[in-house]
Structures are given as structure tokens and as C-alpha cells.
Amino acid sequence: ILLQEIRLPSVKKHLKKELKNYKIISFYLDCSLKTALKRDTTRQTKYKRPLTVEEMHKNHAYEDDGDIIINTEKNTIKQTIDIILKNTQT
């Protein structure tokens, strides 16, 4: 299971190469720039990086083909976990 807030195609490519016998399920946790900035401020106690967050959101905040998109603004933490569990059960 790969959870990502920004797209990570090189990580996915590496994982698929190294873990050939495993199924990799990638979830893209989607939110607006406003929410991303708010969450970053909450995470940071010493340094705030609004320009970095804006730049990352602009350039990398979209899913890759095959990603399961979860809107983390509309879904609670429990709902997000339920979506992940539902999509990982075989």
C-alpha cells in the first residue's frame, strides 16, 4: 500500500521493480491548496513553508494512472481508512 499526497512515479516504478511478486496499490490523498497549507502549518512547529507547499501542490498534486483517489477534505479519517481497507481486501 502506497499513500501519497504528491505524485511519486519514481517511487512506484522502483517498488514495482523490487517487489515483483507483490501487488502495489497506490492511494492518492487529495485536498485543496488551502487545506494543504493549513495541514502543513499544523505539522510544522518551528518552520512554515507556504511557498514550498504551494510549489509542490502546483507541480505534483495530482494522481498517476491507476491511483485510487481519496478526497481527504470530504472524507473523515475513518472513512479514508475504510476506503483503503475496502480496496486492499482480496
Image (tube, rainbow, N blue to C red):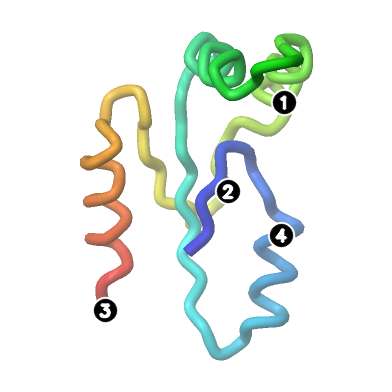
Q: Which mark is residue 64?
A: 2
Residue at 60% across, 14% down:
41
- Tag 3's secondary structure? loop
- Tag 2's secondary structure? loop
Give the quarter of the image for residue 86.
Answer: bottom left
Q: Residue furthest bottom?
A: 21
Above or below: residue 66 compared with residue 52: below
Marks 2/3: CA–CA distance: 22 Å
Q: Which residue is mark 3?
A: 90
Residue at 69% across, 19% down:
53
Residue at 72% across, 12% down:
48
**Of the residues shown, which amino acid type is indicated by label 2?**
Asp
Residue at 67% across, 71% down:
15
Which of the two marks, 2 or 3, is nearer to us in this view? Answer: 3
Tell me where residue 17 appears, x and y as whole percent.
71, 79
Q: Which residue is mark 1?
A: 56
Q: Which mark is residue 11?
A: 4
- Tag 4's secondary structure? helix
Tell me where residue 11 appears, x and y as whole percent.
71, 60
Marks 2/1: CA–CA distance: 15 Å
**Of the residues shown, which amino acid type is indicated by label 4?**
Val
Which of the two marks, 2 or 1, is nearer to us in this view? Answer: 1
Q: Residue furthest front?
A: 46
Number of numbered labels in the structure image: 4
